[in-house]
Amino acid sequence: DYNNKYTEEELNKKIDNILKIPVIKDGILLEEEEGKYFVTIKDGVKIDLGAVAKGYIASLVNDYFKSKNLTFYNILGSDSSLIYGENYYREGNVYNVRFNNPLDATDKSYVKVKNTSITTSGDTVQHRVLYGNLYHHLISPKTKRPENNYRLLTVIHEDPIFGEALTTAMFAMDEKTLKEFTEENGVEDYIIFKSNGDIIEVFNNYEFVIDRNDDPISSTLIKWVVISVVVIFVAGGLLLITKEKKDWRW
């Protein structure tokens, strides 16, 4: 509730009611027959396509561009669903795509990509802090509540629809489960900004360029050297001017 109109007691009561909602086991059955797919949904199960809708639309646009033999383009399906063709203006026809580190604005790390999609899930846009707890829109189907292990999670995958499903599912996993899931399902290129400030970087097929200034000692040392040079330069200039004035008076 963006108006925060609930008391803490009322909010906790609503959370308790949500936790009491039963989870229907094997609620969705997917079957294939003669090249056609059929979905059977058990009573009480609801489907929300928000996790893949943007990727699906972006994929249709991408297919259309390819049917018209377009080569140089990129598709912006909001900041969370991106598709890249080739870049006419850069060597190697690659796009340098920067990751926005939610905990460090000085982080300018980026990945070089072309002819692929980049999908992101996170809590940096749709969230609310209520009574000291952060709540966002990505709900775990197991715990029935938002998990706060990560802030942003980005996957590079040739299929934008699958990429959307991946990031949504992975965001609700703990780190151990996520590592096992990615290894078992061949997810080879992703970056995760954890809530504690740590970063998980896995890139097997794309060049990842790290450009971050996360060493406060080095940063302070560089600033100190620059300031020292300026001070010495100014002091030397004043000394020279003073000397010239004394020589002129003589």
Image (cartoon, rainbow, N blue to C red):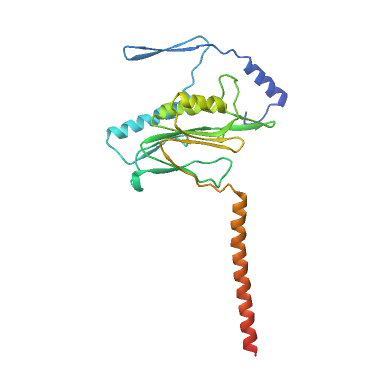
Q: Nearer the viewer, residue 207 or 244?
A: 207
Residue drawn 62% across the image and 87% down it: 247
Q: Nearer the viewer, residue 135 or 162?
A: 162
Location of the C terminus by quadrant is bottom right
Front in this rendered view, residue 218 or 112: 218
Taking the image as drawn, is residue 4 in sight? yes
Q: Residue 161 appears at what percent x and percent y?
A: 41, 27
At 52% from the left and 27% from the top, the residue drawn is: 179
Q: Is residue 184 above or below residue 234?
A: above
Residue depicted at 71% across the width and 26% down the height: 8
Vertical relation: 235 (above or below) 153:
below
How many marks on residues? 0
Q: Left or right: where does residue 180 sit relative to residue 205?
A: right
Q: Quadrant of the N terminus?
A: top right
The image shows residue 184 at horizontal and vertical percentages of 46, 23
246 relative to 200, above or below: below
Residue 232 percent location from the top left of the image: 62, 69
Residue with the most extreme bottom position = 250
Residue 208, by quadrant, is top left
Image location of residue 111, percent across then percent down: 44, 41
| Figure check: 191 above or below 42 | below
Give 45 or 193, whichever is nearer the viewer.
Answer: 193
Residue found at x 60% / y 23%: 145
Q: Is residue 137 visible?
A: no
